[in-house]
């Protein structure tokens, strides 16, 4: 079994294996109905528990479809409905019970420490469904989407991020090292990636370019990514932060600095960081991006359950 907590922990060759499997499975399903199970039914009889401490639309539904299409089942919990959330039961005992009743655990949490702690007491795999420091299932799926659209390995492309230095960007930075792609980041001076992220890049001989000017970051990009300026439970002065990002809005003008056929991607939900014109344009592939999470998470589940062939 394997945990899926951060892309940092997973060897590049395993990440690639997940993407190859996802492509094969996606291709084979072209004429399948939403809930039709893949022919090999690899997770028949398996139960995934999903638990959310924060809101979610995509992660919840894409994991629901992913496990169902592999032949398994899922139950979705909210922490405040458990003894754990009310302080009536320890995390360790909750983890032991989860390990008794089910086969995999997906957690969206407000605390990276909590995910780590769960992983210590669980005897089943845990998947990070978004934490303050990363969003690994989102970004691995985004690599798949980029390669599907551009029909090239991501290592041959110029990838750009314009926006906040948040969990999604942290995972994208890790991915840039694991998949060896060029990453240019455009963000205000006071919002650059945290030191622990930059130290990891340096230690792993990666290189990212950070600009305080969105146009410089976007120059010659094949893909421009963004995300909300204010993340879930972001404890900041929201008005100030939005003002600080006023020159980092993705609009038609900014897109014109990228390559002519540049793709726009965004994990959703969106805020004011992108104009509707760009978000709904032909080169915006955000709906495909959301859909691909189903396909990639299926292969992540197989990796976690030790069933990836
Ligand atoms: N992109 C993403 O993780 O969306 P949700 O917050 O809706 O799960
Ligand atoms: N950075 C965002 C991603 C939402 C999917 C957040 O953490 O809220």
Image (cartoon, rainbow, N blue to C red):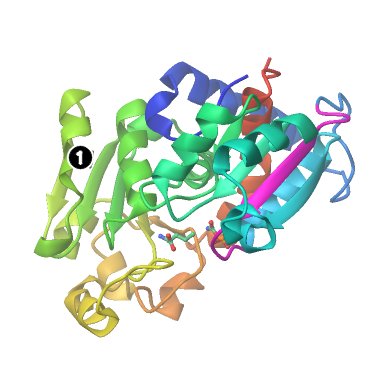
Q: Is residue 268 left or right of residue 24?
A: left
Q: Is residue 158 left or right of residue 240?
A: right
Which sits in the foreground, 2 or 270?
2
Q: Name the image quarter holding the N terminus.
A: top right
Residue 295 percent location from the top left of the image: 67, 40
Residue drawn at point x = 37 percent, y = 42 percent: 171
Residue drawn at point x = 20 percent, y = 40 percent: 196
Choose top left, top right, bottom left or bottom right for residue 254.
Answer: bottom left
Which sits in the foreground, 98 or 231?
98
Does residue 219 appear in this view? no
Which residue, as the protein is rendered here, is positioned at the far bottom? 239
Q: In the rendered image, which residue does mark 1 sit on?
A: 196
Choose top left, top right, bottom left or bottom right for residue 201.
Answer: top left
Q: Secondary structure at mark 1?
A: helix
The stretch of residues the image draws in magenta is 43-56
**Quarter of the render that holds ligand 2:** bottom left
């Amino acid at each position: 079994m394997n945990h899926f907590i951060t892309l940092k922990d997973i060897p590049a060759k395993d990440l690639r294996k997940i993407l190859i499997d996802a492509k094969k499975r996606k291709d084979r399903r072209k004429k399948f109905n939403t809930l039709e199970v893949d022919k090999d039914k690899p997770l028949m009889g398996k139960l995934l528990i999903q638990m959310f401490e924060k809101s979610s639309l995509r992660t919840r539904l894409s994991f629901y479809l992913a496990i169902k299409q592999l032949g398994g089942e899922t139950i979705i919990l909210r922490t405040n409905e458990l003894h754990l959330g009310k302080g009536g039961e320890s995390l360790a005992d909750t983890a032991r019970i989860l390990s008794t009743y089910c086969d995999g655990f997906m957690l969206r949490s407000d605390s990276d420490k909590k995910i780590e702690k769960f992983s210590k007491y669980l005897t089943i795999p845990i998947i990070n469904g978004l934490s303050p420091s990363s969003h690994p299932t989102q970004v691995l799926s985004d690599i798949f989407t980029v390669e599907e659209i551009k029909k090239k390995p991501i290592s041959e492309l110029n990838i750009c991020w314009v926006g906040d230095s948040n969990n999604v960007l942290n995972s994208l930075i890790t991915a840039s090292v694991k998949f060896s792609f060029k990453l240019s980041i455009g963000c205000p001076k006071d919002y650059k990636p945290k030191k622990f992220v930059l130290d990891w890049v340096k230690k792993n001989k990666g290189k990212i370019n950070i600009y305080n000017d969105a146009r410089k970051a976007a120059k010659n990009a094949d893909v421009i990514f963004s995300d909300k300026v204010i993340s879930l439970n972001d404890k900041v002065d929201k008005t100030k932060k939005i003002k600080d990002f006023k020159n980092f809005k993705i609009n038609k003008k900014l897109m014109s600095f990228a390559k002519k056929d540049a793709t726009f991607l965004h994990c959703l939900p969106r805020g004011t960081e992108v104009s509707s014109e760009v978000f709904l344009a032909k080169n915006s592939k955000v709906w495909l991006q959301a859909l691909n999470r189903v396909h990639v998470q299926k292969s992540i589940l197989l990796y976690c359950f030790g069933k990836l062939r």
